[in-house]
């Protein structure tokens, strides 16, 4: 009798562990037996499996370019890797925190690492190479004032300084500090940039 009771108790425990809540598995099986089918897919905007490259046209340092760019390419990568303008640097790994990738875009300084190349169709861009080719007074002033030590951040400073002088031909020290506030230099050359910009401004005004 004891063995028979133990056998019945074990069987009851096994059934309790495998029993599903009412209306779940059993209901599903019943609905399938009654001819029910799976729910139809939700219809909406179709998401493409791939995004095609885009054709953009831009002018860099006075020269027109037509490029096929991927949707995730930054302007910095296009300028450096596709067009060869290596003055555009990458100091902060694309976080927009150092200013070393700065270019002049449509008359204003811009961080090329934060700009998507596909959005720059029709843009007019100037890099440090273009400033040097034009023999802008900033080039000589930067050399004479020893603004470069390692030189890695110098192109970004140069581009930002050019944009400042284009906007304010006779900037004050405060104007210069505010304009260069987004440019970082690990070598600590900040005072030299102020003097160089002041010297270049004098040349542009014909005072030297």
Image (spheres, rainbow, N blue to C red):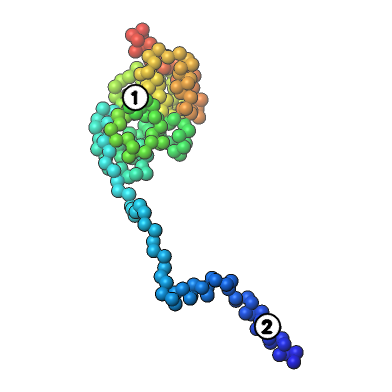
Whether 68 is drawn above or below 149: the answer is below
**Residue at position x 41%, y 65% from top?**
39
- Identify the residue shown where x is 48% and y is 24%: 181
Q: In percent of the image, x 37 and y 29: which residue is there? A: 103
Q: CA distance from mark 2 to mark 1?
A: 84 Å
Q: Position of residue 142 (x, y in %)?
A: 40, 20
Identify residue for label 2: 10
Instruction: Give the tally of numbered discs.
Output: 2
The answer to whether residue 155 is visible is no
**Residue that carries the numbered disc 1 in the rendered image:** 107
Is the C-beta separation of discs 2 and 1 under 8 Å? no
Q: Nearer the viewer, residue 68 or 101?
A: 68
Q: Earlier in the sequence, mark 2 or mark 1?
A: 2
Percent x, y for residue 56? 27, 38
Q: Residues within 10 Å of mark 2 (few under 14, many from 20)?
A: few
Q: Relative to 192, is 26 above or below?
A: below
Q: Is residue 20 among what the camera can see?
A: yes
**Is 157 displayed left or right of 10 in the figure?**
left
- Tell me where residue 18 sits by quadrant: bottom right
Q: Position of residue 90 (x, y in %)?
A: 42, 36
Q: Which residue occupies the foreground of this view, 175 or 135?
A: 175
Screen quadrant of the N terminus: bottom right
Nearest the viewer among 53 and 85 is 53
Q: Is residue 16 above or below residue 76?
A: below
* Quadrant of image for the C terminus: top left
């Amino acid at each position: 009798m004891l063995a028979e009771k133990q056998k019945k108790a074990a069987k009851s425990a096994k059934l309790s562990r495998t029993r599903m809540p009412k209306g779940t598995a059993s209901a599903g099986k019943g609905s399938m037996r009654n001819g029910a089918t799976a729910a139809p897919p939700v219809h909406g905007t179709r998401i493409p499996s791939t995004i095609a490259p885009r054709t953009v046209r831009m002018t860099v340092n006075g020269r027109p370019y037509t490029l096929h760019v991927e949707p995730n390419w930054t302007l910095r990568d296009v300028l450096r890797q596709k067009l060869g303008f290596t003055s555009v640097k990458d100091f902060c790994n694309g976080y927009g925190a150092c200013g070393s990738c700065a270019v002049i875009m449509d008359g204003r300084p811009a961080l090329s690492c934060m700009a998507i190349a596909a959005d720059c169709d029709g843009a007019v861009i100037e890099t440090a190479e273009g400033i040097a080719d034009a023999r802008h007074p900033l080039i000589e002033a930067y050399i004479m004032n020893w603004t470069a030590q390692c030189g890695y951040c110098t192109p970004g400073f140069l581009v930002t300084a050019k944009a400042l002088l284009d906007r304010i031909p006779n900037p004050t020290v405060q104007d210069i500090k505010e304009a260069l506030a987004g440019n970082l230099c690990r070598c600590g050359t900040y005072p030299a940039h102020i003097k160089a910009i002041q010297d270049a401004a004098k040349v542009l005004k014909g005072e030297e």
